[in-house]
Image: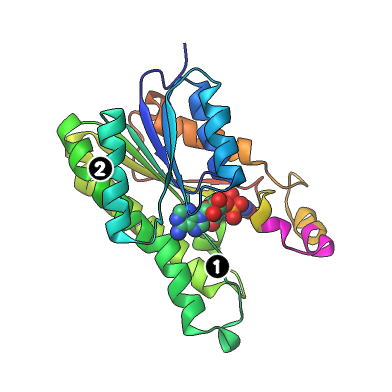
Amino acid sequence: MGLLDGKVAIVTGASRGIGKAIAVLFAQEGANVAFTDLNADENFQKVEKELNTLGVKAKGYVSNAANFENCQQTVDEIVKDFGRVDALINNAGITKDNLLMRMTEDQWDLVMNVNLKSIFNMTKAVQRTMLKQKSGSIVNMSSVVGVGGNAGQSNYSASKAGMIGFTKSIAKELGSRNVRCNAIAPGFIITEMTGQLPQEVVEGWYEKIPLKRGGTPEEVAKTALFFASDLSSYVSGQVLTVCGAMQT
Ligand code: NAI
């Protein structure tokens, strides 16, 4: 028996990193998984294959979470293919770090569109289906940087803080129809996103983290599993920090 047996989950940006770990764990827990990413590259195909070996229905969709029309079309296709949507994990996200002094308008707009507008696009697209079902769980991948800020990441921080405001509002707006909405705020997680940082910067972070290490995508995925499953049936509008006590 899996915690998500028979449920249908959508995970955005799941070709690698945290999104991939969520898609795999959800499939292991019995969910049928629809995932998205920008290109049907080697990673994308590998994830689709891996999910299909787990005995559930799984399919990847090439879709840009920052594009409103694209999200509508993708969710329409997913509903046609899978019949329902029980969980939406808004995971797709990017960084374009720079000090404000050097930040370009493009760097601001891109991060806002991929990280923040995307959750508006995807939540709007699944809303009708979840309201009809009178159930659903939406999980938004924010960040500790959205809670506490970070020098050199004002665009990223603003987008991740915006996700928290959206999460709390949707929890209040859709709660009467049994649709829940929560956010996860990961700290330093070892993925390609953080893999771009120089080793001494990484060591510096580890020194500041009480658990003395970075988190794994699988550890974040377990939190997403809690929110997507009935284990959290009375939890909504919350932000759960997964950061080894880096930010308390
Ligand atoms: P990653 O860069 O390894 O993977 C992100 C995936 O999203 C990639 O496959 C990428 O192609 C996809 N993607 C990017 N833009 C997209 C778009 N417009 N539409 C669809 N897919 C798109 O990133 P990682 O580390 O796995 O992060 C996942 C989420 O977790 C992001 O929202 C990130 O901001 C958040 N996060 C990550 C932390 C970390 O330490 N790695 C810490 C806190 C939050």
Cα separation, mark 2 vs mark 1, equals 36 Å
Identified at 62% across, 41% down, the residue is: 217
Pick the residue in front: 198 or 82: 82
Q: Overall secondary structure of the magenta stretch?
A: helix
Q: Is residue 142 visible?
A: no
Q: Position of residue 79 (x, y in %)?
A: 26, 35
Q: Mark 2 — residue?
A: 76
- Judging depth in this view, the residue of 177 and 86 nearest the camera is 86
Establish if 15 lies above or below 142: above
Q: Is residue 74 left or right of residue 98?
A: left
**Amino acid type, residue under disc 2 in the picture:** Asp
Q: Is residue 104 above or below residue 219?
A: below
Q: Crowding near pointer 2: few (<14 within 10 Å), some, many (20+)?
A: some
Drawn side of residue 9 relative to residue 42, left or right: left
Front-most of residues 248 and 12:
12
- Confirm whether residue 159 shows in the render: yes
Magenta span covers which residues? 194-202
State the residue at coordinates (44%, 65%): 159
Relative side of 60 to 17, left or right: left
Q: Position of residue 218 (x, y in %)?
A: 62, 35
Q: The residue under label 1 is which amino acid type?
A: Gly
* Magenta span contains residue 244: no
Residue 78 percent across, percent down from the top left: 31, 37
What SS does tag 2 mark? helix
Residue named by callout 1 = 149
Colour treatment of the image: rainbow
Residue 82: which numbered mark, if any?
none
